[in-house]
Amino acid sequence: MHGIHTIDTGFGRPNFDAAYLVVERGRGAFIDSGTPHALPRFLDAIAAADLEPKDVDWVILTHVHLDHAGGAGELMRHLPHAMLAVHPRGARHMIDPSVLIAGASAVYGEDVVRRDYGEIVPVAKDRVIEATDGFVVDLAGRALLCLDTPGHAKHHIAIHDERANAFFTGDIFGLSYRELDTAAGAFIIPTTSPVQFDPDEAHASIERMMRYEPEAMYLTHYDRVTDVKRLANDLHEQIDAMVAIARRHAGAADREDRIAEAFAELYVARARKHGVALGTEAILKLMKIDIRLNAQGIVVWMDRVAR
């Protein structure tokens, strides 16, 4: 649709982590890069779109978390003419990814980072462009507008595709797993991050995107969703509910565990209301990592605002 090709990067499990190839008049742009393990899938996507690597002009990163950007350096090695566009706060981490690797290792452990993310290689400085707020990528006359959208991360952009009237949202418009789709449509939850979540900024970024009246959102986790107004309202409601839960348990010695348990109850209850037929254990297994990360992210936010 509109020359937008979904790439399942294979990270984690099938239908979990998406990147996109946008094709316009024989030229291509990737949105996000997955991990280095995903490189064969990106090269296959180029061929499936009847392009060659030399026909790809851009790699645009929504942000520099490794499931979105870890493979950028390896991918750029195979795209001789491409430039990489990234938030100004993220540019230095693509040129020298050592801090990213150290940060991920601190959260997940070095062995997990090596296994799941592979070898993270740098991008040459002269191929990196800082996508400041309002920067427009011109893809053969097709405007891809980069908007500063903090909330999940300070180095986050969302990309508005004028042709499709849609956003590539990275993580700022939440997570929606296809296993939780029902007759009522897609089910969605917000996603924090371990260090930079900010609920007020998340609300503002969602509202900023909604002012464009988009017809669809292309999520990293996972794929295209419509009924955008309903999903935006769902995200707003849940962000507020998550903040209320966090404040309720702020003084507990085991606050992160209590918050994670309450988040699980919140998401399962909303899934049931949405008509999700999966058993509770299956729902929790699907969202286990996200529940823990959301709890970690909101605890860090509470500590930051308390200082």
Image (cartoon, rainbow, N blue to C red):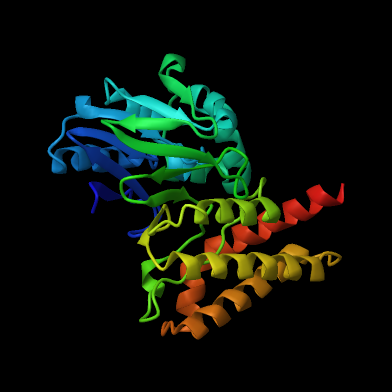
Q: Residue at x 54, y 30 (%)?
A: 132
Q: Nearer the viewer, residue 209 or 265?
A: 209
Residue 184: give x, y in percent of width and height.
40, 80
Q: Quadrant of residue 291?
A: bottom right
Left or right placement of residue 307 versus residue 4 in this view:
right
Residue 164 drawn above or below residue 65: below
Horizontal relation, residue 252 to residue 257: left or right: right
Q: Which residue corresponds to the image point at 47% horizontal and 48% vertical from the top-left?
A: 170
Of all residues, the one furthest to the top in this rendering is 126
Q: Observer-nearest residue: 249 or 237?
A: 237
Q: Residue 244: percent from the left, percent from the top?
A: 75, 69
- Determine whether 259 is above or below 302 in the image: below
Residue 114 seen anywhere in this rendered image of the structure:
no
- Which part of the image, by quadrant, shows the N terminus? bottom left
The residue depicted at 62 percent of the width and 70 percent of the height is: 237
How many badges with numbers are in the image? 0
Asked if residue 117 lies left or right of residue 14, the reply is right
Direction from residue 124 to residue 238 in the image, left or right:
right
